Image (cartoon, rainbow, N blue to C red):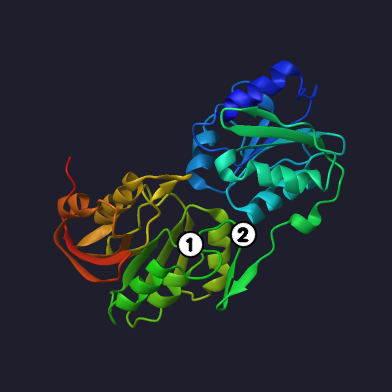
Amino acid sequence: MRSARLSLALETGALDLPDSGRIAIYRPREGDDLSMLPRDRIVVLTGFKPDHDHYATSHSVTPAAPYAAAIVCLPRSREAARALIAQAAAEVAPGGWIAVDGQKTDGIDTALKDLRARVDLSDSLSKAHGKLASFLAGPDLSDWRARPHVVAGFQTLPGIFSADGPDRGSILLAAALPAKLGGKIADLGAGWGYLAAEILQRPGVKRLDLVEAEADALTCAQVNITDPRARFHWADATGWRPETLLDAVVMNPPFHTGRAADPALGAAFIRAARRMLAPDGSLWLVANRHLPYDAVLADSFLDVKDVAGDGAFRVIHAIKPKRAKP
């Protein structure tokens, strides 16, 4: 969908590639086709580790401002979108163009309306249920840059999960955790550190690995969690491996890919937890009730039971991980 708009913009002259210089692409997602752009001049900039790793195999992912031009792939959060546009405006050389592209479902109309009040914005190009428009770098948009919020004593940033405070599922999970969890624990999809703070209050914890794919969330966690027992990993939890097998894994896994629900993502977290745990280890998981995790839990653990929850969430304790199938 994004590629259709980019190709049309280049074919019609709505965007003219600069003769030289690097072109920054801010937060493309895996699957976005960038083949209409000169690969040797592209710099992909994203804090989401799976997307970063995907593009790192074929493009530069090392920041190298200033840029001759940029494409901002719009995130869903209005604040995060503004922050990304402001970053591009600061990193593109004056006079270079900045294209803003997004789906209607991701708020592109609102973003372009906000932007039109601040800059001389081109006419928007509509195609494939989205829009693209551009402006020339120069205007100061620094007031749109991301600024931390402090919520219940924790620092968060726009666009990260549950930026306005602890989500209901994590609160339920934290309340259900036992007094003793074990010595070696991982928090998968750790976010900005709410569950990690709760885990570290349990006696006997010797090491806690916080594994988070979103760099902004992990940066906040490093501010919020200063306990020396904590270790921080910018990684895709489904592929991360601990140094030694763990006593417990705690997680509130994501279940969306973009706007679309993707239960396979949570299932991958469950399988990853099985591989990380010692033979007598346990998984503590919170999930929306509608998510079909029972089969993967039964396939991964010998004993699975609900221990808490409400009308929307279930808190699950699973023990005795099964040996992974070859």
Q: Where is residue 193 in the image (x, y as percent from the top left)?
A: 48, 68
Residue closest to the eye, 188 or 229 = 188
Q: In which quarter of the image is residue 277?
A: bottom left
Residue 147 position, x and y percent, is 69, 63
Mark 2, Cα crowd under 10 Å, few <14 / some 14-19 / many 20+, is many
Where, by quadrant of the figure, is residue 137 drawn?
Answer: top right
Can residue 229 be seen by looking at this rendering? no
Helix, strand, or loop for circle 2? loop
What label sits on residue 158 in the rendered view? 2
Mark 1 residue element: loop
Q: What residue type is labelled 2?
A: Pro
What residue did someone put label 1 on?
191
- Count every numbered label the image shows and give the total: 2
Which of the two residues, 238 or 164, is positioned nearer the viewer here? 164
Q: Residues within 10 Å of mark 1 (few under 14, many from 20)?
A: many
Is there any visible trace of residue 201 in the rendered image? yes
Residue at (79, 47) in percent of width and height: 90
Tell me which corner region of the image, top left, top right, bottom left or bottom right, holds residue 313: bottom left
Q: Quadrant of the N terminus?
A: top right
Q: Earlier in the sequence, mark 2 or mark 1?
A: 2
Query: Residue 279 in the image: x percent, y percent?
Result: 17, 61
Side of 184 relative to 106 (left or right):
left
Instruction: Identify the residue at the far top of this view.
Output: 11
26 displayed left or right of 68: left
At horizontal 56% and vertical 67% (from top left) the residue drawn is 164
Q: In this view, does 60 lie to the left or right of 311?
A: right
Q: Position of residue 271 (x, y in %)?
A: 26, 50
The C terminus sits in image quarter = top left
Amino acid type at circle 1 is Gly
